[in-house]
Structure formats: structure tokens, C-alpha cells
Image: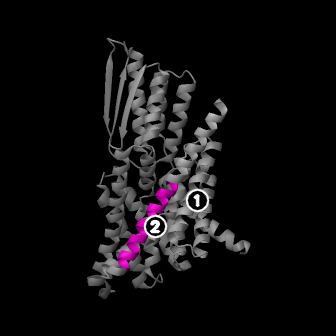
Amino acid sequence: MSSAEMIIPLLMGFAPTVGFCLLFHVPFRHIIPVALVGGSGWALYTFCISQDTGKVIGCFLAACLVGLLGDICSRTLKEASTIFTIPGIMPLVPGSGMYYTMLALINGDYTSAAAQGSETLFMAGAIALALLVIGSIIKIIISLKRKMYSV
Amino acid sequence: MISQVQKRALILAVRAGELMMKNGAEVYRVEDTITRICKACHIPYVEVFATTTGVFVTIGSGGENGDIYTYIKSLDGGGTDLKKISDLNRFSREFTDTDLSVEDGMKRLTEIDNGKGYPLPARLLGAGLVASFFCSIFSGTIHDALCAFVIGMVSYAAAAFLDRYDINYFIHGFSCCGLATFLALLTDATGISGYYSPIVIGALMIFVPGVAITNSIRDFLSGDMLSGVSRLAEATVIAVSLAAGAGLVISLWKVIGGGIL
């Protein structure tokens, strides 16, 4: 994989995340870290797609990365982690799946609508599950850390 | 006994919680902030129950003949303003760590509430960026991306216009997405853009309910089932409204509009 192939998806994720930052009023000093979180999530997603993992697994892994980086950023910059995860997760939300499902329904193609629709649902579920998993792991790590310091 | 200062602290705490909830914070953060502010004012007993539609706080002085006060605040929906969440987060930390008085705290909250985020032109630019880049991700050409940039800005401007009139949020998503789809079909028919699908997807991404999805998961994670379910329902309804808006316009276009141009 050449470096250009790595950089382009990062940029493709970076720019829309900046857009979402503006839409959600992310404080100006945090725009760059937030956009980097979103960009790296999107880059991992496109990498997974290129390795034929399927959209759902790609979404899951990318959302895991966003959740993890968001938590690291929120701890180092002392901010609420929502500020990093909400715009970071936005590029992964399956808007295109929603659209293609609707298009298939209009055309009366119910087989493809069911396929597209279930994939869209699974993608949304994968994002949710990823955030849940990362959140729980971080909770466990923090409580373990506390125990170790207190002993 | 609950002193006068503690009563005012209760009002301050509920106000802070209300602002957080309205601007898109998770339930546990709201409950945590309210409890922290009350504890900082030496209130012995605090119980908070927060959902997306209301905040209920009870404070008590403890003991056999102690006082109990309850404050119920009903909430209606708001937008997502992460700057205010960040400010409120810092405020609650400051309030508990320093001896900021309740009156000064109230003033700070009003300042935060009145604080302006990015002006409309900046948000329009953001909407344009989102739409154009998603258009090119879904195999749109440069021409399509430029069209998506403009259409995204126009549909976001329409959304901002509708926000002023407290329009029902289903109609909000429905009409904004419908407008974007109509404009995309128009550019397709007049030959300005190559194909309308990528443009519609780009515009759709602006309104996608990512915030509701993320927050509902966080609420589930921290055990706030009620808010989790209600936010999940909100996300589903918004997604359906967007698809319905785009779908209706495309089918109408196929039936009547397509032949005219």
C-alpha cells in the first residue's frame, strides 16, 4: 500500500468531520484533534473494506478506534468524551444504506431492500456495539487501576 | 434544615442539568453534575433522576425531622451544541473545586446559555463540506461534489429556518431531505450534475441522527434504560423521516415531474 493510498482516506474522513464539528459547535481549539479522530476512523473503515472484511466488521473496527481515540483525547485534553466521539462517529453512520434501502423500496425491489436494510441496521448496531465494548473495557481498566493504586 | 443558600444551589444545579440535557449530553453526565453541585454546597442528601424529557431532583437535610425539597423541570428538545457541553463541564468542575458563590454561578450559567456557537455562515460551510465529501466518497464526480456543496448549504439553511418556528422534528427532517432531493433531481435533469444519487446521500449525511445513536448507547451503557430507549426511538424516527422525504420526492418526480423537463 503506497503512502498516497493511506493519506487520501484520512483526508476524506478529515474534511467531513471538520464539517460536523462546525455543525455541532465543537470548540475551535479542539477541531483538529476531533477531525483526526474522525479521519483515522474513516481510514480504518476504508482499509477494512479494501481487505474484504465486509461493511459491518469495518464499521465495528472503525467505531472501536474512534471510541478509543476519543477517550484518550478526552483524558489528555480534559474534556467530555462526547465532544470527540459524536463528530468522529458521524462519517460511519450508514446514510447511504438508508438511501439505497429507500430507493429499492420505491422500485418495488423488496429482496434488495431487505438486504440493504438489514445491512444498514447491522452497521448502526455495529457502531453501537463498538462504543459499548470500548466503554466497558475502559471502565474495567480504570477500576483495575484504582484498585492497584489503593492497595 | 435546608438553608436559603442550599435552596438556591438546588435551582442552580437543576439549571445546569437542564442546559446540559438540552445541548446533547448523556444522562449520567447530567446526574453527575447535579449531584456534584449539590454536594459542593454541603447538602447531605441528594437524589437525581434525569431523562431526556425531564429532570427531577430531591434534596434533604437528613435526620429525623429533616426538610425535603423537590424540584421538577420538564424539558423540551434542543439542538446539539458541544461547546456548551464543554463549557458546562468546566463550570461544574470549577464550581466544586473553588468557592464560587451561587449567585456568580448563576451568572456564569446565563453567560454559557447565551454564548453563541459558530455563526450561520460557518455552519453552512460545514454542511457544504459534509455534503460534498460524502458525494465524492459515493463515486460522485467533481461536478456532482460542487452541486452537493451548494445543495447541502441550501438544505441546511432551510433547516435553520425551520428551527426558528419550532417545527415538529419529523416534518423537519422530512422537508429538509425532500428539498435536497428535489434540488438534486433538478440538477440531474438539467444536466448540471451527472447523477443525483451521490448528491442526495451527501445531503442526507448532514441530517443523519448520529448524536441520538451515540447518546442512546451511552445511556444504555450506564444503565439509564428509559433515556436509552427514548433516544433510540428518536434516532429511528429521524432516519425514517429522512428516507420518507427523499423517497416521496423521487417517486413524485418519476410520476409527474420527470416528463416536464
Subunit that carries the residue with mark 1? A
- For disc 2, the marked residue is A94
Given residues B114 and B66, the one toward you in this image is B66
- What kind of secondary structure does the magenta stretch mostly adopt? helix
Residue at 55%, 46% in the rendered image: A81
Could you tell me how many numbered marks the image carries?
2
As drawn, B251 above or below A125: below
Question: What mark, if any, has residue B106 been given in the picture?
Answer: none
**Pointer 1: what residue?**
A38
Q: Is residue A100 left or right of residue A75?
A: left
Residue range corresponding to the magenta coloring: A112-131
**Which corner quadrant holds the N terminus of chain B?**
top left
Please identify the quarter of the rendering in which residue B53 is found.
top left
Which residue in the rendered view is the most extreme toward the front? Answer: A151
Residue B183 in view = no
Q: Which of these two is toward me, B118 or B18?
A: B18
Residue found farthest to the bottom: B259
Can you say whether B33 is above or below B201 in the image? Answer: above
Instruction: Please report, as a chain letter, where disc 2 is located.
Output: A
* Residue B25 in picture, x, y percent from top left: 45, 44
Dot 2, crowdedness within 10 Å: few (<14), some or many (≥20)? many
Q: Earlier in the sequence, mark 1 or mark 2?
A: 1
Q: For numbered disc 2, what is the local secondary structure?
A: loop
Q: Residue at x 64, y 66 (%)?
A: A10
Residue type at numbered disc 1: Gly
Displayed quadrant of residue A110: bottom left
Q: CA distance from mark 1 to mark 2?
A: 15 Å
Q: Position of residue B203 (x, y in %)?
A: 44, 68
- Residue A100 coordinates in the image, percent (x, y): 40, 76
Q: Looking at the rendering, in which quadrant would you find the C terminus of chain B?
A: bottom left
